[in-house]
Amino acid sequence: MTNLNPTRVVTGEVRFSYCNLLKPRASQQGGEEKYSVTILLPKSDVATKQRIDAAIASAIEIGRTKWNGVVPPMLSIPVHDGDGVKPSDGMPFGEECKGHWVFSASTKVDQPPKVVDANLNPIINPTEVYSGMYGKIAVNFHPYANAGKKGIGCYISTNVQKTRDGEPLGSSAPDAASDFGGAPQQGFGQQPQYGQQPTYGQPQYQQAPPQYQQPQPQIVMPGNMQPQPSYGQPALQYDPITGAPITGGVYGL
């Protein structure tokens, strides 16, 4: 289908970064929330780059009237070389940008993009849309003049397609083991496992130490008589013939 809008481009397959396609986000605290994405276009896709250059040239001509017929000599262009440095701070682009053209596109909250999968089915699950995935996107280049600055902006033109998964971009959160080390050893100040006694830094006795164990007196009973508890009294002995208790002497005498 012939593109009737000279400033609109549908890309070949690109990689997405800083992906805010299903939920808007403000670029800075207190700023306007927008749907946005950074697009990594492989330099090998010469055809898409040529269409983008032509669209930017058309946008500049449209902007000539907005800029009182004068094109600024230092016009801000949204497409950057991923093998170079970022215009914002002069620092190199990330490794994922190497070998790519890098540009960002956004749209306002009241104009959410339509995100579909490879079969053109709408994507609703937010976990399926992330930085690092691959896809295609329709963008529109348009001139702007704001706060004394003039240039060409890039805007999401409704449609975004995810073509395939890719390695997620961005650092992942560290796991608990890397923050806190391995499993702690049982010791002072730690909660014992169920069924264990707390150590508190000292060995635990399962029974009293030998020096605290009182000898238990044995009661010798004749016949089938059962011994009675002593409750700390000396053990009684019984005459094995008469059965009488021995309170002194021999055989009760």
Image: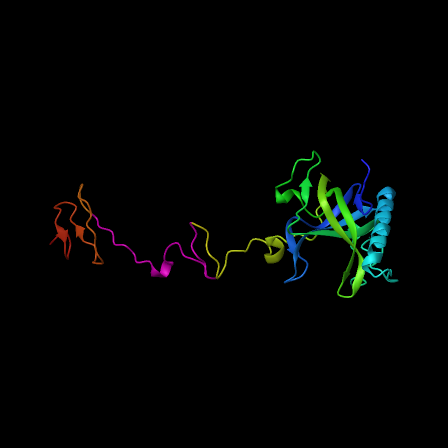
Residue 4 location (% of width, % of height): 81, 41
Residue shown at 79% from the left, 63% from the top: 149
Residue furthest toward the top? Answer: 119
Magenta span of residues: 195-220
Q: Position of residue 165 (x, y in %)?
A: 71, 40
Query: Which residue is at 50% across, 56% downward?
Result: 186
Most foreground residue, 145 or 207: 145
Q: Examine the structure image and report whether residue 23 is included in the region drawn in magenta.
A: no
Q: Position of residue 250 (x, y in %)?
A: 15, 54
Residue furthest to the bottom in view is 148
The answer to whether one can see residue 44 in this image is no
- The answer to whether one can see residue 175 in this image is yes
Residue 133 picture quarter: top right
Q: Quadrant of the N terminus?
A: top right
Please identify the quarter of the rendering in which residue 114 is found: top right
Q: Residue 55, how many percent across, how many down?
A: 84, 48
Of residues 194 and 13, the one drawn nearer to the viewer in this rendering: 13
Q: Residue at x 86, y 47 (%)?
A: 54
The prevailing secondary structure element of the residues shown in magenta is: loop
In the picture, the quarter occupied by the C terminus is: bottom left
